[in-house]
Image (spheres, grey):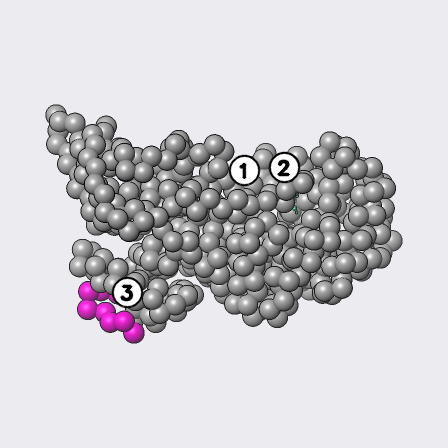
Amino acid sequence: MAKQKLIIFDTTLRDGEQSPGASMTKDEKVRIAKMLEKLKVDVIEAGFAIASPGDFEAVKAVATAIKDSTVCSLARAGDKDIDRAAEALKPARSARIHTFIATSPIHMEYKLRMRPEQVLECAILAVKRARRYTDDVEFSCEDSSRSDFEFLCRIIEAVIDAGATTINLPDTVGYGEPGQYGANVGRLIQTIPNADKAVFSVHCHNDLGLAVANSLSAVLHGARQVECTINGLGERAGNASLEEIVMAVRTRHDLFPVETSIDATHIVPASRLVSSITGFPVQPNKAIVGANAFAHESGIHQDGVLKHRETYEIMRAEDVGWKTNKLVLGKLSGRAAFRARLDDLGITLASQEALDEAFARFKILADKKQEIFDEDLQALVTDAAVPEVDAKYQLDYLEAFSKTGTRPTARVTLLIDGVAQTQSAEGDGPVDAAFNAVEKLAPSGAELKLYSVNAITQGSDSQGEVTVRLDRDGIIVNGSGADTDIVVASVKAYLDALNLLAAGVIKAHPQKEGV
Ligand code: KIV
Ligand code: ZN
């Protein structure tokens, strides 16, 4: 059967960034975008340009750096949003503007306070305005799965006439059920007279754990673009996960009449990169990219796999990139080898200063840890990134003491705006004691919402990668830090979170009106 193309639209950098605490800096976004380009993602949604000056700059930087994928910015259906998106996308070789407005009765009445006729008019104007800047315009009917079928037909026909080339049908609140959602997409494609002039797309949220199932059902009913994210990152319970969509279509090629252009061998490195930058760990039993996804624990399974692999494996681990955990560099490796390995990993540091800093850290790490793996390099580069806002708090010195039968203590010296200050504190453990000392030096008024430690590689000499989530008056930030000493990694993560709070970047949220 001749396969049709399934367009993979990645929104890790936009919807993924809407996960509480997952916000990324400009350089981090560029690093992830380059990895997505290596994956051969068709469209990269780089952000929501009007959300903040930082978002604008990030979309612009991605548009400048990416050559092989289309770069997209989200824009609400209004002139200002669209003009800002177009401005940020100017450097792109191939640019898409993605504009949207809610179409469900509940959103139109209570959120937009608009009548359906006004929404229709607004949508047409938005698409026409976007078409002034690019031929590649996507229109989304927000909350489409709770929208009236007749109204969807009217608005979609009108926006295609106005020039929309992709029509996206988001299941914004994760309400869809695969049979019904897919059939509805199919019915729209059959009913709308000019449906053949646009690509139909889906964008599913995972509130009921059905995002991937809903997306795939829609593909079986004619959708030819899926919007998804690495590791299923995204608002609330997340979006459909890119790796699951791609591997389902590939593995069940007997069922799906489509194929993607994705180079799946970069899936695991992409998953690791996103996890280390956002500080969102991947659960071990996560399909495709979880540490246990290809681990056959039971004797019966192991025996079967050894005799004939396909007895229990439907995919090959190496096909999705499970091979990267190899020794790459050691103590004697020089700068050229270091740089070459970063290139292989798709990491280009923004400046000579960042490269020097990363190399210096590599040498320190190589003294502590004999074997340096790709995962160590990813963490090290994340740690060495030159902050885009000046870091108010920096770790200068840390001493932690714990002994059975005594209360742990820590002594911490921070450089606060460049000035050294020291405090000591006790705690329930050395990490708690160190955090208490930091709080004495830099009282944050924030609540610790999450503390997690993850071993980056195997072995007890592994670096610990720590995530600290702080919540101050509803502003949630995730800090991350890595080190072979987990108390040091923990304090680095805590300071990273404090620095993000201190930078105080306020962003508009695309789905809240009037921001
Ligand atoms: O979930 C949603 O509806 C969205 C749109 C803005 C596409 O993210
Ligand atoms: Zn969404």
Residue 406 horizontal side relative to residue 347, left or right: left
Label 3 close to label 1 by CB (< 8 Å): no
User: Which SS class for mark 1?
Assistant: loop
In the rendered image, the residue lying farthest to the top is: 405
Q: Residue at x 58, y 35 (%)?
A: 207
Q: In the rendering, which numbered label is found on residue 359?
A: 3
Q: Indicate whether residue 333 is drawn in magenta.
A: yes
Nearest the eye: 314 or 396: 396
State the separation of the CA atoms marked 3 and 1: 37 Å
Q: Residue at x 59, y 44 (%)?
A: 508
- Residue 180 is drawn in which quadrant? top right
Query: Label 1 sits on what residue type?
Result: Ala
Where is 64 relative to 270, above or below? below
Question: What is the crowding at mark 2: few (fewer than 14 residues within 10 Å), some, or many (at least 20)?
Answer: many
> Which region of the structure is painted magenta?
325-336
State the separation of the CA atoms marked 2 and 3: 44 Å
Question: What is the crowding at mark 1: few (fewer than 14 residues within 10 Å), some, or many (at least 20)?
Answer: some
Q: Which residue is mark 1?
A: 237
Q: Position of residue 7 (x, y in %)?
A: 64, 59
The answer as to whether callout 3 falls within 8 Å of ligand 2 is no
State the separation of the CA atoms marked 2 and 1: 9 Å
Mark toward the start of the polypeptide (2 vs 1) = 2
The answer as to whether callout 1 falls within 8 Å of ligand 2 is no
Q: Indicate whether residue 433 is drawn in magenta.
A: no
Label 2 close to label 1 by CB (< 8 Å): yes
Q: In the rendering, which numbered label is found on residue 174?
A: 2
Where is 196 relative to 510, above or below? below
